[in-house]
Every structure is written in C-alpha cells, then in structure tokens.
Image (cartoon, rainbow, N blue to C red):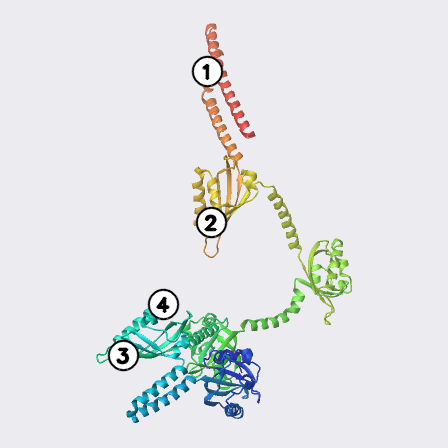
C-alpha cells in the first residue's frame, strides 16, 4: 500500500478537491487534503491536519442536523460495506473573509482506500463544487416556468415584462456574471450590477464602445477586435464567445470569458448584442497550476535517476519510459514503445515472469521482486523492481521502478570470495598482521613474518616488539602507541628495523585499538615493508631541496599570462633584469617591449604553436629595458590548452638574459674574420719572399758562383729578408689587435 505522502502526491495531481481521513469514528480525523481542496475551501493544511472532520467543518447555523447526519451516514456506509457513497447537491456553506456564509452546493463521493490486507487504511471524501450547476438548473426551472406563463398568459404581457425586469435585476444582484446590452448603432453599453461589483467601477458611469476597447489588454486587443468584427459581419453568426483580459478599476487585469448573443435586423445587420462577461481568473490560475503540476510530475518521471516505465496490464506493452531507462538499457524510446516487458527478460525467465503476473501482481497492490533483465547489448543485469497499479488514460497500467543491484550482488559475492581468500592472504600477503597489548607485547603474528622479516613467529610471541625496532626510532614508536588512548586508529610514520641479515628495512604500520573486541582484545598492527618507497622519497626530497635552492638563486624573469583575461604576471626577475616594476600587466605590454624587428617573428612562432596545439616553444629576441636599452633574451614558453575545446587558457615561461652570450659570439665571429685574414697573409704574402730566400741560399751554396755574383745574391737575400720581416710584423700587429678586441669584449 502507498504511504500517506505518496497518496497525497497522487491526489495533488487530481483537480477534484479531496480530503483524506482516518477511519476512527466518531472523529474521522483529517490526515491530509490535496491542493484543489485547500483552494476550494480557502483553508491551509495546518488548519485541517490532525483535526476531527466535524471540528474543522462545523455544522452550518441553518442546518437542522439532517445535512450533517447525511455525512455521518456516508462515513458509516463506507466503514460497514467498504463501498463508495455519493451525495448529490449537498449544501454546506463556507465562511467568507468577512465572516459571512457563502452558500455552496457540492456533489460528494466518499470511498475507502484499502491496504494490502483489504482493510480500510483511509477514507477519501471528494467534493465537487456544483453551486453554479445547481443554480443553473434552478434557473432553468424558473425559465421554464416563465416560458410556460408567457404562453398561457399572453394577455398579461405588460405584467410579465415587469416581472421579467424584476427578475433581471435580481439576477444582476445574485450572479457573479456581468450582464450587458450593447446598442451597436449608438455604441453605448449598458452593464448589469455585477459588472461594477466584479471590476469595481462606479455605477452609473458611461461605457461607450471606445471605453470598453480601452479596457482590453493591449496584447489581446488585436485578436478581440478581429474576431468580433468577423462575427458581426457574418450574418449567419448570432453567437460570439471569446476569452481575453479586461482591466479593473484599480489597473489590474482579470481573465474573462464573454458570451454574447447578436440581434440582427431584417437585412442581417447586427443592431444589438446581449451577453455576459464571466470572471475566469481563478479558473485560469487553477488551470495554470494544474499545468504546472503536470509538468512537475512529468519531470519526476522523466528526470528520475532511476529507470521507470509504465506498461499495459493487458498487453504488457510499454506505454512510456523515462530517460534513465533509455540510458541504462540502451533502447531508444521508439524501440521501447514497440516492445513488451517480456522483451527485456532472458527467455529462460519468461515462465517465471508470467507466473508472477498471474499470482503475485494484483491490481491496486504494491509488489516488489528481484529479477534479471537483459539490456540491448545482451548484458544480463540483476534488478529490484517495485511497482503499483495506476490509470494511464483509459487503460489499467502499472508503473515500475527498476533498481540495478548487479553491483550489489557482485559485491556480496566478492565478500564471500574475500572471506575465502582471507586465510590465503594472511599466509601469503605482503602485510604482516600482529596483535599486541598497549605495552607492545605480541600475542599474535601472521606466519608471513618469517618470509618478510626473517623472524620465526615463535621469536615474537610473548616478546616486546619494541625491542626489535631500530633504537633511534623506538621512543617515537612507543609514543605513537599511546595515542590509541585518545583515538581508535593511528597511522604510524615509517620506522627502521634491522633484519637478521644485517640489512635495514623501513616498515610502515597502521595500528587499531581493538581492546574492547573480546575476539581480539588487543592492538591490531598492519605492517608492510616500504624500504624502496622510503628510500625513493628521501632521494626525491633531496632533489626537491636542491631544486628549491636553485630556484631561489636564479635570476630568470618568470612570467604567467592568462589567455582568457589577457593578464600578465611577472616575478622579481622583471625588475632585477630589466628594471620594470614587479606587477600585473596586460598581455600586449609584452608585445610593445619586444624589438620591432623581432616582434613579428616571435608572435608568428607563438600563433603557430597555438594553431598546431604544440605546448612548448623557444625563441631568442631583443627585449626593451625600463631605461630604453635592449637586451638579448632567450624565452621559453609553455602553452596550456582547455581539454574540452582545445583553446589555450594559460601560457607560462621564463626570460633569460643572453646579452653577454650574444656579444661573446659576435666577438668570436669578428676574431675569426681577423684570423682568416692572418691565415691568408701567412699562406700567400709570406710564401713569396720565403721562396726567394730559399732559392738565393741554394745559389750561394753553389760553388759555381763567383764573388761578384755572391755579393749580388746577398743583396737580393737581404731585400727578401726585409720584406719577410715587414710581413711578419704586420701579422703580429693584426694578432695583437685581435687579442685586444677579444679581451676587451670578453671582460665587458
């Protein structure tokens, strides 16, 4: 059976006013009421809930007791026979805001809500306000009498006209419909008393057609004017009906429905129109609320995270499915609506389903079961289905919620498997499990301690485990054990243990206080050897310390730019290296400080990396200092892209001053040019005089030359030696100049 909240949720979707009562005579305590009932009775749920029905709705002052007894009889009939009881045109007056009695007539149906055992869980009283219908029937009876009298008393037309006018005035006073008469030829409109009462205009005010048109809401004006004009022009039309918004005297607008009857002359021209204007604001508001409720319940169905569907009880065909069912089972909505609930069951489960439908699923009763379903992919899943009977239009249907419990079943099986593996894990696992008292004396240790630490279990049992710990870590470990007096569990920082082979091992433990558990009565220690990890962490820490020291010592200008906001941030290097303030800049500030001859090349490089989604780029260019001079820099940038749209979101980099390196390279190039010149001089100019000297020396060594020839040869030899000396002096001078140029630039 549905809970009270679920019942209220269902009845709130019904436009008929309903109140839900407990079957506790004579009180018939109010359990709940739907929104339509609260609106119809102008009450709040807090005024009704928990109150006896006849306290919440006391006997009317003019009731001699028979009307109240009729309600009692209805409740008794439902309790005795478990059948509904209908009362037509039951009068019960509601109090208005000014404490007057508002005469109301109701069609009341009282019926039981049975639980799964067939007992009455609640009594529901649905009340339909038929006051207008009742008066209409009464008015119809009166009109029939009038017509009968007109036929029988033709000779008393004037008297009947007076009576008719009298009745017209009474109707104007009694009805909430604004009666009017429009003289189309004079354009004057005569309104009944109800018009002034409903719309708060002063009686006696003149209402020509132009004023009525001004009262129509601007958004409705064109439609009213067009529709009314076409109806008046069509001689075959005598009735006009239209809904629009009409302005009240206070400037607010009411939704109205107008019904008019057109009187035409012999030529068919409209000369008068008599009709009523009915305020339907509350009806429109109720319609809007009902539409909102429909949307709400539609959202509850379609947007539920759990798969939900509705199927026909006769054909078993799907009538509707929500988005979660479509996503979870893989079928499209069109595919679902062409299938039955048999199609999502494995074939071998069909007979079980049919048996359940025949013997367990009963109309009006909640049902739950654990079954297997088949997805479109063929995957078999385990689900818990919970369903109940509903009316789906004119069909008897059932709404079902499916909860996938496949993972739960797998988890349960995993627990069973885990328990089976527990002993194996204890024996062969990498963690040592031990139990000690608060002072560290061992009462249990897993057998794998021998494999992991090289100790036989008997060596630890009854011994102080702290005595096996590295002496430098022993006191800290003992202090951490005492923390269990304040908390249930503690993760012990890695500590050292010297194994029997002389090797130092790092061990990490989680200690849990289980002294209150009689099965354990001690401290459970889960320990594992983490030697490799700790040694790696120590190495990493050493590297990080070294990196942090280097970072503090670097003079690079680190920059960070947001590609979305265009904001550019610098570290202290922007001041130390270039003299600019260390603050936030705009992105284009960087472009303005790149040398004009370099900026195009650098921006094209960055744009190309963005286009090709390449994160890293490097470039050398000239950057303007605060004093207007330029420095050569090496810029290394890194682009960060959005994973969703691939657009750059951030760029980080560092500027390194390479001015000295560039100047050094320029000096080297200039020196190389001088050395090239010196080499050319050595290979070309030195060779000629040297060749002459060698030839003359050969001639002098010859015995064939006389004294005179020797003197001439010596003169030539002297000239060649002088020429060679001048060339060598020139080479030395060039070399000295090159060394001076190189040295001065190097020191710069």
Identify the mark nearer the N-term, 2 or 1.
2
Identify the mark at residue 237; answer none if there is no mark: 3
Q: At x 48% / y 24%, what residue is drawn?
A: 678
Closer to the observer: label 2 or label 4? Answer: 4
Q: Residue furthest bottom?
A: 152
Identify the mark nearer the N-term, 1 or 3.
3
Closer to the observer: label 2 or label 1? Answer: 2
- Which quadrant: the C terminus? top right
Identify the mark nearer the N-term, 4 or 3.
4
Identify the mark at residue 218; answer none if there is no mark: 4
The residue that mark 2 highlights is 614
Identify the mark at residue 692; answer none if there is no mark: 1
Between the C-alphas of marks 2 and 4, the distance is 60 Å
Q: At x 72% / y 66%, what residue is drawn?
A: 513
Provide the secondary structure element on which disc 2 rests.
loop
Closer to the observer: label 1 or label 4? Answer: 4
Between the C-alphas of marks 4 and 3, the distance is 26 Å
């Amino acid at each position: 059976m549905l809970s009270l909240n679920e019942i209220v949720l269902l009845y709130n979707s019904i436009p008929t006013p309903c109140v839900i009562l407990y079957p506790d005579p004579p009180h018939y305590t109010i359990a709940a009421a739907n929104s339509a009932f609260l609106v119809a009775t102008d009450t709040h749920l807090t005024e009704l809930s928990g109150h006896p029905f006849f306290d919440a709705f006391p006997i009317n002052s003019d009731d001699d007791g028979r009307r109240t007894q009729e309600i009692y009889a209805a409740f008794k009939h439902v309790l005795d026979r478990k059948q509904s009881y209908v009362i037509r045109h039951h009068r019960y007056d509601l109090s208005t805001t000014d404490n007057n009695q508002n005469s109301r007539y109701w069609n009341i149906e009282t019926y039981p809500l049975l639980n799964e055992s067939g007992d009455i869980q609640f009594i529901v009283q649905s009340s339909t306000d038929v006051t207008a219908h009742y008066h209409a029937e009464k008015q119809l009876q009166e009109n029939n009498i009038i017509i009968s009298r007109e036929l029988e008393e033709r000779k008393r037309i004037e008297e009947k006209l007076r009576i008719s006018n009298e009745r017209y005035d009474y109707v104007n006073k009694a009805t909430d419909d604004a009666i009017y008469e429009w003289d189309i030829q004079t354009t004057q409109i005569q309104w009944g008393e109800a018009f002034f009462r409903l719309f708060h205009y002063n009686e006696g005010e003149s209402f020509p057609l132009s004023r009525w048109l001004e009262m129509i809401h601007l958004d409705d004006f064109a439609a009213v004017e067009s529709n009314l004009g076409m109806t008046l022009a069509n001689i075959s039309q005598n009735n006009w009906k239209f809904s629009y918004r009409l302005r009240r005297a206070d400037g607010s607008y009411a939704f109205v429905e107008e019904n008019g009857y057109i009187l035409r002359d012999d030529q068919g021209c409209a000369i008068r129109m008599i009709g009523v204007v009915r305020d339907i604001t509350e009806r429109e508001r109720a319609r809007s609320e009902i539409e909102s409720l429909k949307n709400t319940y539609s959202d509850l169905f379609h947007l539920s995270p759990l798969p939900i569907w509705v199927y026909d009880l006769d054909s078993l065909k799907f009538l509707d499915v929500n988005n979660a069912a479509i996503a979870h089972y893989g079928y499209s909505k069109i595919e679902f609506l062409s299938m039955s609930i048999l199609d999502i069951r494995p074939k071998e489960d069909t007979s079980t389903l049919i048996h359940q439908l025949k013997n367990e699923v009963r109309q009006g009763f909640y049902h739950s079961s654990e079954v297997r379903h088949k997805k479109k992919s063929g995957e078999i899943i385990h689900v818990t289905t919970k369903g109940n009977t509903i009316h789906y239009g004119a069909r008897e249907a059932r709404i079902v919620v499916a909860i996938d419990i496949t993972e739960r079943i797998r988890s349960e099986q995993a627990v069973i498997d885990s328990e089976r593996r527990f002993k194996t894990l204890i024996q062969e696992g990498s963690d040592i499990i031990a139990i000690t008292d608060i002072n560290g004396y061992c009462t249990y240790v897993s057998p794998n301690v021998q494999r992991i630490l090289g100790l036989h279990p008997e060596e630890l049992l009854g011994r102080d485990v702290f005595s096996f710990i590295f002496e430098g870590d022993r006191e800290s470990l003992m202090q951490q054990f005492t923390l269990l007096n304040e908390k249930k569990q503690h993760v012990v920082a890695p500590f050292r243990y010297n194994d029997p082979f002389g090797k130092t091992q790092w061990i990490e433990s989680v200690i849990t206080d289980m002294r209150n558990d009689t099965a354990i009565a001690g401290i459970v220690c889960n320990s594992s050897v983490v030697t490799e990890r700790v040694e790696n962490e120590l190495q990493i820490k050493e590297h990080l310390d070294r990196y942090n020291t280097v970072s503090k010592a670097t003079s690079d200008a680190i920059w960070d730019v947001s590609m979305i906001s265009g904001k550019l941030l610098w570290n202290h290097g922007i001041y130390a290296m270039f003299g600019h303030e260390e603050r936030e800049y705009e992105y284009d500030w960087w472009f303005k400080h790149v040398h004009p001859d370099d900026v195009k090349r650098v921006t094209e490089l960055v744009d190309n990396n963005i286009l090709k989604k390449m994160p890293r780029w490097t470039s050398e260019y000239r950057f303007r200092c605060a004093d207007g001079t330029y420095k050569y820099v090496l810029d290394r940038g890194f682009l960060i892209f959005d994973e969703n749209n691939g657009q750059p979101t951030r760029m980080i980099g560092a500027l390194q001053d390479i001015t000295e390196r560039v100047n050094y390279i320029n000096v080297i190039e200039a020196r190389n040019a001088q050395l090239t010149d010196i080499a050319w001089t050595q290979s070309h100019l030195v060779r000629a005089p040297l060749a002459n000297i060698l030839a003359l020396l050969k001639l002098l060594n010859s015995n064939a030359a006389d004294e005179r020839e020797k003197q001439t040869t010596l003169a030539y030899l002297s000239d060649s030696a002088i020429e060679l000396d001048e060339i060598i002096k020139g080479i030395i001078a060039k070399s000295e100049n090159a060394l001076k140029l190189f040295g001065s630039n190097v020191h710069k």
